[in-house]
Image: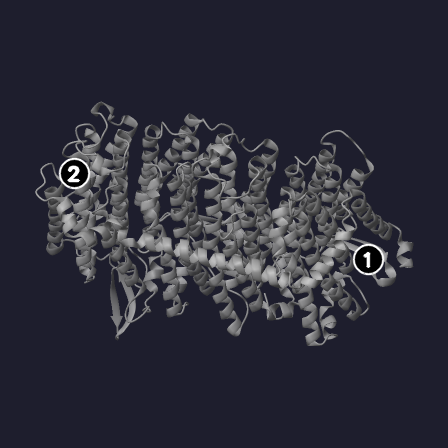
Amino acid sequence: MENNTFLLSAIIFLPMLGALLCGVIKSDKPYFYHWLAAGFTGATFALTLILGGRYTANGVAKPGFQFIDVLPWMPQFNIQYQVGVDGLSLPMVFLTSLIVFLAVFVSWKTKERSRLYFAMLMLMETGVLGVFTSLDLFLFFVMWELELIPMYLLIGMWGGPRRQYAAIKFILYTMLASALMLIAFLVIYFLSEPHTFDLIVLLQSQDSLLAGMSRPFQITIFLALFTCFAVKLPMVPFHTWLPDAHVEAPTAISVILAGVLLKMGAYGIIRFNLGLFPDFMQWASLGLAVLGMINIIYGALLALAQTDMKRVIAYSSVSHMGFVLLGLAAWNELGLNGAILQMFTHGTITALLFIFVGVVYDRTHTRDMTELGGLSARMPLASALFVIAALASIGAPGMSGFVSEFLIFTGTYGNALTGLNHFLIQGVTIVAATGIILGAGYTLWMTRRVFFGPLSERWSELSDINSVELFSVVILLLFVFAIGFYPALLLDYINPASMQLLSHVPGGG
Amino acid sequence: MDLISQNAWLVACFPLLAALLIFCVAAFNREANKMAITLSLVGTGFSFVWALALLVLRLTQPERLLNGSVRWLTAGTQQLDISWAIDNLSSMMLVVVTFVSLLVQIYSIEYMAQDKGIPRYYGALSLFTFSMLLLVLADNLLVLYAGWELVGVSSYLLIGFYTAKPEAGIAAKKAFIVNRIGDFGFLIGIMILFYMTQSLGFVDVSQAVIAGKVPGVTLAIAALLLFFGPMGKSAQFPLHVWLPDAMEGPTPVSALIHAATMVAAGVYMVAKLMPIFAAATTPLFGSFLVLDFIAVIGGVTAILAAAIAVTQIDIKRVLAYSTVSQLGFMMMALGMYQPVIENGILVEIIPLGYTAGIFHLFTHAFFKAMLFLCSGAVIHAVHTNDMTQMGGLRKFLPVTAWTCLIGTASISGFPFLAGFWSKDELLLAMWEAHSPLFWLAAIAAVLTAFYMFRLYFMTFAGEYRGSLAPEDIHAPGWAMRLPLIILAVPSALAGFLGTPFTPEQWHFKNFIHYSGGHHGAAAHHAGFNGVVLGVSLTVFFVGAGLAWAMYSAKPMLDPKALASKFKPLHAASFNRFYIDDLYDFGVRVLLMSVAKIAYFIDKYIIDGMLVNGLGLFTIAGSETLRYSQSGRIQHYLLFVIMMVVALILLFFWAPLGKVI
């Protein structure tokens, strides 16, 4: 195990350095900040590849945190700067650096205030990477907040007509939620002996920590954390900020929002709710399964009722993130691996779909499906690629969605719970599986309405996807296919982590 | 031969490679027609040779194992594999799939010559060939399911090939979604079996099932759910609605996917998983087993689709409903069994129609592919699907007319042609099982002969009724004629592998028979049965004779008069018994209403009342924030930079930490 290599810290703070440089250097050259951002996010991505390569020893990924960097920060409060990755966070770090890097290219047409735009984009990346790697609750909270402000500005300044409303809704929701998180963290801090925010210590001493709390108190803390993360996930009924934010956000921001930010919620649930309160998590399994099922079906129904492409995909995110919740109810490696893989899968596939919405919108200036149609005649390559993305989204084999859905369904059906809950979760899984029918419904319906059928006169001058857009699409598709063909590629990282996560529970796993 | 036996999986990989290459090249050059055709033909050609070699291996060295697996993923300590195995059944399917695929691809060179998007077409055809071969190679439920979904995907791509045609897009979507309904059941069946047996491999699962590790009721439900998959893919009632609409795709595609191979996947799957179906001896209700359910669904499908086919005027739709009906026959046969009862308890089931069902799949693949290709040649010549605009085409398209006549006679059961023998085997199985479905099948067979000869007469006999000038009706060229002629041979002769008089060692049943269960239930065949043979002959002459009386050059009965005499019946048949309308209502009215209600709730109750009803807070919050939104970048920037600086100070300047 390598500690204090500062490789991970370099990954986290490289984008922030880029953001600072944006602030320091003033240039009138066109695309200067574009290239700056591409350079820094690209370097970050390259470093995560190195990290991934060095993570395994003799080709085998070990459980537990690695690449831990520790520095004292506020020693009198026992607060330290501590980051590290395990099989849960590594795929998320990888996803983040990938998606943000590609988002730079998706934003290539951003001319207005590009300096601030890319500074915010990179600042946000540091925040998100920090969230996925923090091993200190206080640091986690700071990083969680650090992501919010740039996102707020990115939606509020570069967004659509109702951007102010959407941005405020986004930030209010998340701020309220993070207030709950802060309270929960503070309670944990004061109840731990000695007082600490150190996640590694807390994970090791969770039994004594829990022993210090009464049961109702434990439940309250558990629910406070869960609610915070559920807002971010987003879980019904806390999901209404998402479609608004998506619709107003510029394409690249939608890509990041769906591709990365939602995973912060799922990550938090797994890291804290499952990590610190495994007993409750298991106790709450049936509830999780039901909530997941509601997300899947309700989200899919909402997607069916939309005419705006972005809204369809936004609600499909609600539906697909429901699979993560469902997988968490399984309490076996199949389900948990599936849930974590689904986070990655959804990140790449939804990013793809949003990129295509951007491609269409840039050319037609509408996302209304009642006005679109037949675009494949003018955009053959874009529509062919969109069909691939759509098929990926509905879990076609050979692509990563198939793997995670298969794992989640088989895992949750064979859940490790006992008694009545076991059978109830099986029932819930079967109901949730209707999501594969509804998902095919809204996705293919959208595909047909936008790309197939006769072409209206209005769109006879459209150009096909350009090489900058193509670049992002092809990179994302490569990952979608690679994991679909050989999921062990990523699951060999994830599996040790999920085995460890499940080992905490007596009788679980 | 070692090279082939150790790399059996390559049979599926050639077309996959071809598909990938074609799609990659097509991304840069959409006019790369020659390259696409060459790659696709070479890929499938290699596969065909490979498949033939594997078949020879199965015939000559049955002891040699043709299987293997690679790790796909590990979850916990459980490993999921991609595993493949070739038994007799799959080696036969490999040959049929690659053979028909190859011929269809040759045919398409000419048929599709005028169309745009040839690389896309051939890429999708190669992808389909790969998917189908993957499905056939599968040795566990995971690979089977993956191949199963992938054939659905490639079928979606091919049905929707004519992207500008609205009907094509709708049909493609419909096909995929209806199949997904079936796959939903299939998936749950897999989930249950995986959960109960902790394995996905066919051998492991069936051994566990036969050993009684799965409780009877659970097994029956799992088997029933598994059968939902074939109901979708093989277009069984009530999930048959997608197949006739799938005719919006190019005709060669209909021949390959929607007649010979993909739709047969359901039949193949039921046969492949027969040990599981046969082990489900716990009745669903009364004494009604899962196999009975399969037989009844098959029977209903066979008769219903045949009854619809008799009134359709679109040549491809007649063939489509004919396919649905024939698949029903195969399912019916697979559902035939002989119960073994000891001490009043049903201990085992011996499937009786296993060989017959597969044999019919085998012969049907040839003559139905050929019939579709014939219809393609006709449509190519007269530019319409409407049979009322055809007639007398024998003069213009002699090769097509002859091959079509062979196909028609074969499917209708003209003595000694392929369809006659396979249908005879089907009826024999039903007769031996003492199933009342025998008579249903006989009636459906009469209808088959009727609608097929009706199709032949309306298209080729009499005088031309269309609007084209005779010199504008072009006979097909060699690329289209050759596949027709090649397919005519097995369409006529393939049946001799399975007659009651075929020598034992050459007999189809000697190669493909059910060998599962406790006693390894041996192939049991009564061979010759006079009654069944009589019925076989009678149904052909009644059906074909009726068609001749009504639709030949000099009809004795007027179809129009008959139609008006049985008006409600004719209308019901012509309108497909209103099943499609029922679906339409279900989706467009019921589902969309639910979706709209959900959206209403979301917009006005969750978001409107709850979120904005937390209102005071929200308003207060947004008002406050609004003041901070001066709209000046400097302010935002200042704020953010302050944050960042504070953080950095906190981090790098520890003493400050002490101050706090």
Q: Using the rendered image of the protein, determine whether residue B561 is visible from the camera's viewpoint.
A: yes
Say if B337 sits above or below B241 in the image: below
Amino acid type of the residue that numbered disc 1 sits on in the rendered structure = Gln
Q: In this view of the protein, which residue sits in the foreground, A373 or A466?
A: A373
**Taking A209 as reference, is B14 left or right?**
left
Work out whether residue B319 or residue A83 is closer to the camera in this orientation and state it.
Answer: B319
Q: Work out whether residue A85 can be spotted.
A: no
Tag 2 residue = B457
Q: How is the image coloured?
A: one colour
Residue B551: x, y in percent? Answer: 14, 41
Whole-angstrom CA distance, mark 2 to mark 1, is 88 Å
What residue is drawn where x is 41% and y is 53%? B588
Q: Which disc is residue A80 wearing?
A: 1
Q: Amino acid at mark 2?
A: Phe
Pick whichever, A287 or B129, lies toward us: A287
- Identity of the residue drawn at 20% across and 27% down: B396
Disc 2: host chain: B
Residue A330 in percent (x, y) is at 55, 64
Left or right? Give the position of A374 relative to A493.
left
